[in-house]
């Protein structure tokens, strides 16, 4: 945990404890009988009025990441065999290599007798390469096909 994270956590803890009455500003050396603050219990905030806390996990940069399970999921990749209407859906999709770098664009989709994608033809520069569907996944939210191969491996494909 870096120094900034520790400082923020410490400041938050002090603010929280101070707000709950754990620290008081009364002078402990004063014992005058007119000082009624030292004879009363510190004021506290009922825990029922506090908002529910969520679990957090420290991350790089010092800011915690919420462990909220209701957060929107990241873009989900599906097998090309699961794509509905693959010829229309995959037409002109961007193709990215294993590093997530754009390689080219879909030029055509070959569908087998079972209606599932058999291969995808990808334009890379002036050349076109046929990629087998079992090495590809589709991210609908981005209209992107992700390859399990590097660009160098894709361009070696015949």
Image (cartoon, rainbow, N blue to C red):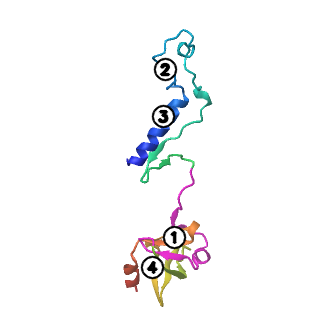
Q: Do the residues labelled 1 and 4 touch (CB within 8 Å)?
A: no
Q: Which residue is drawn at 43% across and 43% down?
A: 7
Residue placed under numbered mark 3 in the picture: 14
User: Mark 2 and mark 3: span between their CA atoms?
Assistant: 19 Å
Looking at the image, residue 19 lies above or below residue 79: above
Q: Earlier in the sequence, mark 1 or mark 3?
A: 3
| Residue located beneath label 1 in the image | 80
Circle 2 residues within 10 Å: few <14, some 14–19, many ≥20:
few
Check disc 3 and report its element: helix, strand or loop.
Answer: helix
Residue beneath the point at 59% across and 32% down: 50
**From mark 1 to mark 4, how far is it between C-alphas?**
12 Å
Between discs 2 and 3, the one toward the N terminus: 3
Q: Distance between the residues labelled 3 and 4?
A: 59 Å
Q: Nearer the viewer, residue 113 or 86?
A: 86
Q: What stretch is highlighted in magenta?
A: 71-100
Disc with the residue nearer the chain's start (2 vs 1): 2
Figure quadrant of residue 147: bottom left
Compared with 120, 44 (above or below) is above
Q: Mark 2 points at which residue?
A: 27
Using the numbered discs, state the Cα–Cα distance from disc 2 to disc 4 in whole angstroms. Answer: 78 Å
Residue at left offset 57%, top offset 36%:
52
The image position of residue 4, as x and y in percent, is: 42, 48
Characterize the local packing of mark 4: few (<14), some (14-19) or many (20 or more) Cα atoms within 10 angstroms. many
Q: How far from the left and from the top, in percent, is residue 44?
A: 57, 24
What distance separates the C-alpha of mark 1 from that of mark 3?
A: 54 Å
Foreground: disc 2 or disc 4: 2
Q: Do the residues labelled 2 and 3 touch (CB within 8 Å)?
A: no
| Viewer-nearest of discs 3 and 4 | 3
Looking at the picture, how far across and down is residue 69, in whole percent?
Answer: 54, 47
Residue located at (57% from left, 75% from top)? 90
């Amino acid at each position: 945990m870096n120094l900034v994270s520790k400082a923020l956590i410490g400041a938050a803890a002090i603010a929280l404890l101070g707000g709950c009455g754990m620290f008081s500003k009364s002078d402990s050396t004063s014992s005058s009988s007119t000082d009624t603050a030292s004879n009363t219990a510190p004021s506290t905030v009922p825990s029922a009025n506090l908002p529910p806390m969520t679990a957090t996990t420290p991350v790089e940069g010092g800011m915690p990441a919420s462990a909220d399970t209701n957060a929107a999921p990241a873009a989900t990749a599906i097998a090309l065999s699961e794509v509905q209407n693959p010829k229309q859906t995959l037409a002109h999709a961007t193709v990215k290599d294993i590093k997530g770098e754009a390689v080219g664009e879909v030029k055509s989709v070959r569908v087998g007798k079972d209606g599932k994608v058999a291969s995808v033809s990808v334009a890379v520069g002036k050349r076109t390469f046929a990629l087998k569907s079992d090495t590809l996944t589709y991210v609908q939210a981005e209209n992107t096909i992700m390859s399990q191969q590097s660009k160098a491996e894709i361009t070696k494909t015949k």
